[in-house]
Amino acid sequence: MSNTINIGIIGSGGIAAAHVRAYKEMPDVKIVAVADVIPGKADQFIEQLDLKDAKGFDDHLELLKMDIDGVSVCTPNVAHHNTSIDSLYAGKHVLVEKPMAVTLDQAIEMVEASHKTSKILSVGFQPRYDPNMQAVKEIVQSGQLGNVYYVQTGGGRRRGMPGGTFINKSLAGAGAMADIGCYSLDLALNALGYPRPLTVSAYTSNHFGTNPIYHREADKFEVEDFGVAMIRLEGGIVLNFKISWAMHMDSLGPTLFLGSDAGLKLTPAGSGPWSGVWDGGIGSINLFHDIKGHHVETSIPVQEHKINIFYEKVRDFVVSIKEGKPAPIPGDQIVINQAIIDGILRSSEQGSEVNISIPEFSISS
Ligand SMILES: NC(=O)c1ccc[n+]([C@@H]2O[C@H](COP(=O)([O-])OP(=O)(O)OC[C@H]3O[C@@H](n4cnc5c(N)ncnc54)[C@H](O)[C@@H]3O)[C@@H](O)[C@H]2O)c1
């Protein structure tokens, strides 16, 4: 492999531009091709983003005939599966945007393709590069909480419903649960070492998206804007996961990890009294930040400069290609995230708890 990594972009919408901006900062990367199903859109994108060396295609299969090392899959969720699989079988490494896929079966097929081809399948969760998220994992994995038996997580937007492809069930697969919920799930599961889910009991609703008072595309709104689930994980852990795109409330509460020796609370900076580890003793809270988000007493290093987590995720993909390393955020692991979302949708539809079954992949944490 030459020192330059040749990259292709599949899907030239909003997030593709963010990928391109990151790649353009890397002197050892060349974007050689862009594909989009809308005729002429890839060429327009190439012009707008000043990608002089890139060729535009209306079909990703044509792009895959080129000498390309890796692709960024930036299509709507529904096309993550076929474009990733085609890319892997064409011998390209894949960085696929979140959520990994629309169904669990699709995610499983994607992982199988990456195993068969020995190519990287990495999922684009940029918060993994946030030092706060890394600190959470470090604390949970250090054992200082003892046995973690309960986790609650999931963010809530008061008014934050997207439109277009995001609310079309056949294109997005799911709504808030998959769109922003997959990040919260990744925060909790990554800290816990991605334990396997056993069962899911869930409820979802869309009182806001389907109401023209709250959404201008209410007649087209087919997904959930709110959901809550209780997930039993292996190891006797229970995960309470909730998410909303819209609600009549300011927050769905902090993320909590309850352990047998101590608890960890994550309050978004500026929205709560504290974040940190508490062992129940008065005055024993180890603070991460105060009410204004200022860092207070803690052993976790303060970041002197702001990290561009999106750049870091794209760079890590490139470095893994160059150095022959495994996927930074492996599909093998994120298939568990997809299994939970799949279970939530099934449980909510059936109105009862469902079992989760995933093939025995080697899950790396
Ligand atoms: N990581 C993040 O921060 C982040 C942020 C926003 C969106 N996303 C994810 O990125 C993906 C794309 O979101 P977006 O906002 O850019 O959507 P978008 O609708 O702006 O762009 C998607 C593009 O893909 C094209 N497309 C559709 N099917 C295709 C196919 N089979 N082959 C080639 N092109 C195809 C569409 O024509 C469109 O131009 C979604 O999965 C979304 O969840 C991630």
Image (tube, grey):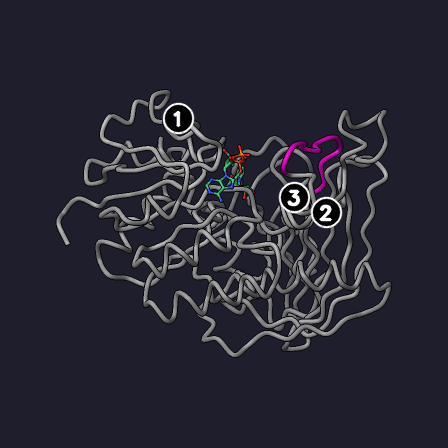
Front label number (2 vs 3): 2
Q: CA distance from mark 2 to mark 1?
A: 33 Å
Q: Residue at x 14, y 47 (%)?
A: 3
Which residue is at the front of the view, 115 or 194?
115
Which amino acid, by three-letter code, is at mark 3?
Answer: Thr
Q: Residue at x 86, y 31 (%)?
A: 211
- What segment is highlighted magenta in the picture? 156-165
Q: Are there few (<14), some (14-19), or many (20+) residues within 10 Å of tag 3?
A: many
Q: Residue at x 68, y 53 (%)?
A: 153
Residue 79 image point, x, y percent: 53, 48
In the displayed structure, 252 sits above or below 55; it is below
Q: Secondary structure at mark 3?
A: loop
Which amino acid, by three-letter code, is at mark 1?
Answer: Phe
Residues tagged 2 and 1 counted as in contact (Cβ below 8 A):
no
Which amino acid, by three-letter code, is at mark 2?
Answer: Ile
Which residue is at the front of the view, 299 or 101?
101
Q: CA distance from mark 1 to mark 3?
A: 39 Å
Q: Are there few (<14), some (14-19), or many (20+) residues within 10 Å of tag 1?
A: many
Q: Earlier in the sequence, mark 2 or mark 3?
A: 2
Residue 304 in view in this figure: yes
Residue 258 image point, x, y percent: 68, 63
